Amino acid sequence: MARPFRDSLADACAGIAASIRSERNLRVHLAAAAAAIGMAAWLRIGPLEWAAILLAIALVLAAELLNTAVERAVDLAAGGSLHPLAKAAKDAASGAVLVCAAASAVIGLLVLGPPLWRLLAV
Ligand SMILES: Nc1ncnc2c1ncn2[C@@H]1O[C@H](COP(=O)(O)OP(=O)(O)OP(=O)(O)O)[C@@H](O)[C@H]1O
């Protein structure tokens, strides 16, 4: 029988909270996201620009949460022992975060750069 939606939602929120507590990189990404949101609000960007910024933020945070899930699953499967496949899985998951973070940084520059430049240039 399917579990109530509110239980699934509570588990998802607990997973996010636990990952924030345990993963320093996730906290760094959250701080960067807060800075981007603050700057976007300050620059009064339009709705499409907001959509791009929020999607970029969601992409990085989701990638970081999936990276955490891969790390936990690999640690469980490896049982404390070192294995080349465990390393390959963890490094590929980290690579996914890097790809998303790099793309998001470029999106942030493309969206926030021009209005910031105009504001500073006057
Ligand atoms: N069981 C294992 N067998 C082999 N290599 C491993 C194993 N666990 C981790 N490693 C490797 O050790 C390094 C550090 O792994 P660790 O799990 O500490 O990642 P991390 O530093 O927390 O990663 P991230 O910065 O993405 O959160 C990585 O290169 C990883 O691939």
Image (cartoon, rainbow, N blue to C red):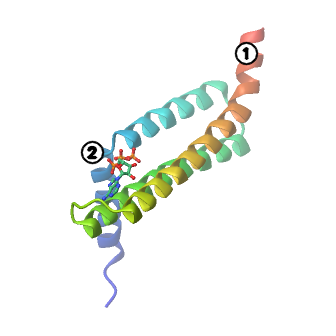
Q: Is residue 58 visible?
A: no
Query: Disc 2, ligand 1: is the CB inside 8 Å?
Result: no
User: Is 98 placed left or right of 51 in the picture?
Assistant: left
Q: Is residue 103 visible?
A: yes
Q: Report the residue that reaches farthest toward the left.
A: 80
Residue 53 x/y as whole percent: 63, 42
Q: Residue at x 68, y 40 (%)?
A: 107
The mark nearer the N terminus, 2 or 1, is 2
The residue labelled by disc 2 is 21
Q: Report the residue that reaches farthest toward the bottom.
A: 1
Residue 117 x/y as whole percent: 74, 18
Q: Residue at x 65, y 44 (%)?
A: 103
Residue 62 x/y as whole percent: 48, 55
Which secondary structure, mark 2?
helix
Residue type, label 2: Arg
Could you say which is closer to the camera, residue 86 or residue 7? Answer: 86
Mark 2 touches mark 1? (CB < 8 Å): no
Residue type, label 1: Leu
Res. 27 image quadrant: top left
Residue 18 x/y as whole percent: 27, 52
User: Is 90 placed left or right of 115 in the picture?
Assistant: left
The quarter in which the C terminus is drawn is: top right
Q: Is residue 95 above or below residue 7?
A: above
Q: Is residue 32 above or below residue 79?
A: above
Q: Residue at x 32, y 51 (%)?
A: 19
Q: Between label 2 and label 1, give the one nearer the viewer.
A: 2
The residue labelled by disc 1 is 119
Which secondary structure, mark 1?
helix
Q: Residue at x 40, y 57 (%)?
A: 87
